[in-house]
Structures are given as structure tokens and as C-alpha cells.
Image (cartoon, coloured by chain):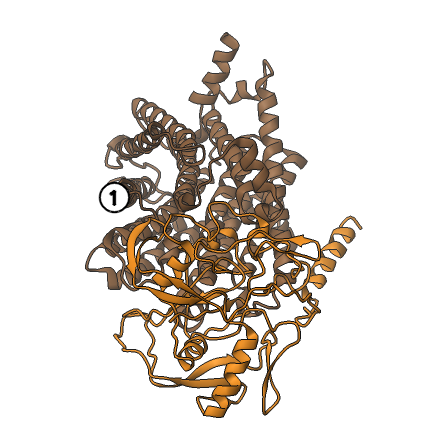
Amino acid sequence: MRCTLPTILLLAVFLASCAPVDLNAALPTFDTGVDPNTWVQIPAGEFYAGQHEKYETTAAYEIMITDVTTAQYANFLNEALAAGSVKVDGDQIVGYYPGDEFHAVKHEEQINAGDWIFIPLNDPSQRIQWDGTTFTVQGGYENHPMTMVSWFGAWGYCGYNGWRLPTELEWEKAGRGTDTRPFPWGDEMLRENANFYASRDPFEDMSSYGSRTTPVGFYNGQTYDGYTTLDSASPYGLYDMAGNVWQWTGNVYEGMHYRFLRGGSKDTYDMDLRLWVRNNATPTYASPGAGFRCAR
Amino acid sequence: MQAINQRLNYLFSSTKGLILVAIAMIAIVTAVWGMLSGPMAEMGVREVVVKLLGMDMVQAEREGRIIILYHSIAMAVIAIEVYMITSLLMMKPFLKTAVRILITVGYIVTMIFGLSFAYFGHNWAFHGLYIFGLSLIFFAGVLLVTALWPWNKEYYQPDKTYARLKSGLDLERLAFFATAVTTVISALFGAIPGSYFGNSFEVFLAENIIRYPEKTTMEYSVIGHLHIMLALIAIMITLIIGRWLNFKGILHKIAMPLMILGTIVLNLGVWGVVTPLEPIAHMIIYVGATPSMLAALLLLIWSWGMLIRTGTAHLQKPTFSQKISALLRDPLKFGPTWQMLFMNFTTSGIGIFMAVKLDEIFRIWPAREERIELTGHWHVLSAIIATIILLYYGDMLGLKGKLRQFYGWGIILLSNLAFASVTVFEMKRLFISEAEQQPLVNMLMYLMDFGLAMLLLLLAVVMVWRLSDLFKKKGRWTEEMDHELSQEVLK
């Protein structure tokens, strides 16, 4: 009898944890006023790179003000499909990648020339839908960052438009500017600065689906239905350079097939939002917490 | 004044007093710094603690702070093990006293000045004192090696029921000696790159560079250091528990050579990572780990058999349930080896599974997921070692009756609940997607937090009891003043 109550409580907690998550739960829609088609000019020159603030230099380049949105990616898929640059292969979209040089280093895997996955279509958290003829975006997610996209899919998007993925250094400089700040907006981080794990933004429900993406440019100082954000643009004016989604970068390093991601995400703590933090994954990896932006 | 002197004398010169102080220091640091962790940050507790204590948390210095924090805790754990060794094994009184003084001053200086430097602004004098504290501990280690010298005939084992050579050389003492020597040498593998990286103000956490194909010798050295030090602390506590339980007989005779061999080979493998042997270092490590783990298994088999035999001695033909009942009768004696067994599910098993399936499963996941496994894995191992110490400490306290049962089973069940939850959390990607994981993560977090919080509460109650005992003129502390652990070894 003494054990009954704790057993019932434990069972209740366990059963609650097994409840299915509604990945299509309604979400608020907000216009952030930030145009994802905007590009930002980053001047050539030195900047402090990495945690230990080493001087590095980049040439001048332009980079997208926000992550690529699902709407932008759906448009790309429709165009690229018509042009024959991508194709539907079962339950995934694939495109050609010319392959990497293989050095047979321990743990390195061969990336040969051929068709590689751009996006999976069968994943329940994929926000792009395919009806057999056209790609559309799930309602409400149009201005959210494109997620569930592999490195190949990010590389393919940028390349199709004549652009490229930013290098890690370019990405970091765009987020950090020329000083030593850890976050795009400065030294300290508050909940209203970015979308991170348990940041209590209007898109989050930690008892159910957890953290979800916020529209690109959401943290721009605007108030949305009573939720006030802080203007968290980087010194060059880029949004979402910390949190929301990890961002694929373009470097292909000798001796490893992993590709690097930067910026932290809706699913990580503040430590991963620091501008120098690196994450990496196989180039076929796709996640509801990983997206990208392009440079040119 | 005399009353204060007596109490200070108890706390800093008796074995049980020294262990009490070290446990209390660890408990305080764990309680305060635990409030800075991820789940506490979610609830806003971290912000309050940082403001309340005036901590200076510069983002770029997080990795450095963490390194100092876990060194501070680890040094106190090592001090506890040294107190136990110096109380369980025969050695020259002068060396025993010198080792204890050095390590006590060492870990307290390391902890106080290390944490002050890391979390409360950068007073470089404090950093110097932190290094000084670590140096004292190193020197204490060198002296301990001298004190344990097994070829001194005074320490030869006359009793043939224990592992010994024909000459009488005590193989158990040799196992302690081998572990102490290799610990001192392995400390250098951290100290040298520590100086190198520290002097150029660059620190890193090993789990963050694990996938880089090319690592420098110094980076390999740090990775080797952190693995072997934890392994050696685990090996040492296994030897200590064996001594306390009076491990002997045929299994002891098999286990001790295995432990010596395993310790040496394991260390050679780890040291090998900074040599051209690096490509096969892992294989050497597996070869070394196997006899060490086998020796621990033999201790487990022997101790469970002993508990069953002594618990059913009054019965002519004990049934299976009577044997199980005898085995579980005393959680403080059953607990340490049970925790060692449980470690195989939460640490060793996971580690082997990861190694076998690394490219197939774990390297498919993003690096941040792999980091969760790596950090979870060694946090659990560290915490299991801590619980084994607490179980032994419960016996040292002389807990009896229901209190003994409550304390012992509390530690075992609460820690097992928390560690099992951590293990499921680490492995969750095997059976649930990122998008659907939140309810499961919530439940696991509740279980982990409940287990750990209740465990800390249990420890806090014991600490408060011991603190209040110090205010009594004829408190328990007076009885413990001259007790040595060797007097309490099971007969």
C-alpha cells in the first residue's frame, strides 16, 4: 500500500512522456518586417576569430541578412525541379554533388560524385510539402528558416542561384563584427535576445513539442502580441546569427567528411550560441534545428 | 579555546575528521555550482546565484572555469582516497602525516583559490595559489608512492590466504603502489599541457575537439589525462573497498595480479597516445581495461558470496530468497560492488557500445549529440565513484538499524534512478527523433533532478547532523578521534 502512490505517480509521469507530440500544432504568425531577400555587405579586413581571439582576414563579401526561409527554399525546389537540377527520389529530394577528394583518414567517409539527399520528404517535421507536382510550404512556416535540409541541400540552393555557403570565417565575421563580443548583439544574453532552449518565446511549449523555430528576423526589438524582443542584430545588421537554427557553412576540410554548423539553435543552451562555437555533422544530416544562409 | 582546538584536531588530524571535511567541501561546491547548470539556468536559478554571489561569468572563459571547477572537486575526491589508503594500509607514521598534511593543504588551497580565480574575477595571485595547491597534491602523491613501497619487508604479507609472492611480497599492496605510481605519472600528462595551454591562455574541453582528424601532441595528452585519471580513481576505490571488506582467498589471488597488470597496461596505452603508438593506443587500452574490470568482477563475486555466507550462517540449508535477503541486508556493504556492477550499464557498457558502433551510429549524429554521450558518460562514472565513497563513509559513521538502511538504500536507489535516466538521455537518439523528444526529455530530467536532488538532500542531512555533533562536548566526534579504518576492516 505504501508503494502504491509513488508507483502510480511514476507511471503517470512515464505515460505522459510517451504521449505523441503534435508536430503540426497551431503556431502564431508574425510579420517581422525583415526582408529575407536582403543582402549585407561585409568589408574586407581583419577581425577577431574564435574563442581565443586570433586575428583573421577575409575579403569583402555579401551575406544574407537572415537564414533562407522555407518559402524561398520551396521556390527554389520548384524552379530547380523544372530545370532538372533536382529530382524526386522516393521519399527524398536529391541533387548532384561533384564529390570530395578522399584522403582515407581515420573515420573519414568517402563523398563521391553523384546524387545526394537535399531534403527528406517523409520526416514529420519537414515543413515543405510535395503533392506530386509542386512544392508548397506548410501554412504559418513561410517566413521561418528552412530546416530539415542537408548540407548538400544548402549547398545546392546557394549554388543554383550562383551563390555559395559562407566559410566559417565569413560566417563568424558577419556575426561578430570587429570586436570580441561573444554574441552578435554584445556580451550578455537575455531570453529576449534569441530563440534558444527554454527561452520562453511565443512559439515554444516545453511540455509538448518543445522549442520551435521563430520567423527569421524575429528578434529585432519589435513587440509581438505583448512579447517584446530585443534588437539582436549583429554589428553588420544580420539577424538570427545566434539561436533559432544552426547554420551550415561551406568549408570542406581535408581528411574529414563532416561539415560545420554555427550559431546554436532553438534546442541548445546559451553556451552554444557563442559565435565561435562549432558543431559538425555528416553532410547528409538534416534536422528541425539546422538551416543555412548564403554568401556571394 | 581548547574546545575549538579539540574540534580542529579532530577535523584535520583524524582520518574520519579529514574525510568529513573533504566530503563537506565537495557537498558545498556541488550544491552551489550545481545551480549554474543547464536545467537550473532554464528555471532562472543560475541568474539569481550569479548575482547573489557576485560571480564574474565571462562567456569566453567558460571552458577554463569548468576545468578549474572539476579539478577542484576531483582533488578533494583524491584526498579522500588518500586518507582511506593511509588509514587502511601500514606505513611509516612520518610519511603518513606528511602525505596527509600536503594533500589536505593542497586540495583546500586548490579549491578555494581555484574557484575564487575562476568565478570571482581574475586575481592572478589566486591562480598561482591554485597551481601551488595542485603542486602540493602532486608532491603528496610522490610521498604516498614512497610510503606504499611494497618491497619493504615490514609490509610483506604473512597470511597465505591473500595474494602474495613466495617471498611474501603483498600483491594487494603492489596493486595500490602501481595505481599510485601511475597516477602520479599520469598527472604530468595534464600538468604539462596545462602549463602550455594555460600560459598562452588557451583552454579547450576535450569533448569539443573529439572529431578533428588532426590533434596536437598536447591535445592528445589532455585527452589521455582526463580518461586515465578517472579510471585510476575508479581502480583505487575498488582496491580500497576490497581492503575494507577484507577481500581474500583464491579470487583475491587471481584478482590482484589482474589489477596490477590491467593498471600498468591501461596506463601504457593512455601514455601511448602522445607517442607514435597512437594508432594502436586504443587497442592497448582495451587490453588493459579488461583485466582491471575482471578484477573488479572477482571482488564483486567474492563480496556477494561473503555477504550471503555470513548472512545465512545460522541457517542449515538457506533457500534462494534467504540468500538474496542476506545479500541485500546491509546496503552499505552490498552497495559499493552493486554500484560497480551498475557502472557497466551506465558507463562501461555505453563506452564499449559507442566504440563498436562509432562510425555506424554515433558519428552519423551531429557532434553536439556525441558530446552529450561523452560528458554524460564520465559524469556518471564520477558520480558512481562518489556514491561508493559515501556508502563506505556511511559505515565509517557507524550508522545502524533503520538509519543505515535508509541512508544506504537512499544512495543506491536515488543514484541508480538518476544515472539510469542520464543513460537513457544519452542514448535517446537511438529510439526517438529530435522533433518528438521533448516529453521524454522532460521525464528524464525530472527523474535525474529528483534522484540527484534527493541524494544531495540526504547528504545535507548527514552533514548537518555531523556539524551539530561538533557542538556536543561528548559527541560522536570524540569517539572517532583515534579510529583508523584498518581497525574496522571486516574480520
| A290 displayed left or right of B290 | right
- Above or below, comparing residue A290 to residue A73 in the picture: above
Q: Which residue corresponds to mark 1?
A: B196
| A112 displayed left or right of A185 | left
For the C terminus of chain A, give its image quadrant. bottom left
Question: Could you say which is closer to the camera, residue B433 or residue A140?
Answer: A140
Which colour is chain B painted?
A: brown
| B60 displayed left or right of A146 | left
- Above or below, comparing residue B354 to residue B92 in the picture: below
Which chain identifier belongs to the orange chain? A
Question: Could you say which is closer to the camera, residue A202 or residue B361?
Answer: A202
What x and y, as percent, mark residue A252? 32, 71
Task: Determine the residue located farthest toward the top in the rendered image.
Answer: B1
What x and y, as percent, mark residue A14? 69, 60
- Above or below, comparing residue B100 to residue B430 in the picture: above
What x and y, as percent, mark residue A7? 74, 55
Q: Amino acid at mark 1?
A: Tyr
**Do we see residue B399 in this rendering?**
no
Chain of the residue on which disc 1 is drawn: B
Give the structural element (helix, strand or loop) at label 1: helix
Question: How packed is label 1: few (under 14 Cα within 10 Å), some, or many (20 or more)?
Answer: some
Q: In which quadrant of the rendered view does residue A108 lie?
A: bottom left
Question: Could you say which is closer to the camera, residue B2 or residue A263?
Answer: A263
What x and y, as percent, mark residue A212? 61, 64
Residue at 32%, 39% (x, y): give it.
Answer: B173
**Do we see residue B321 in this rendering?**
yes
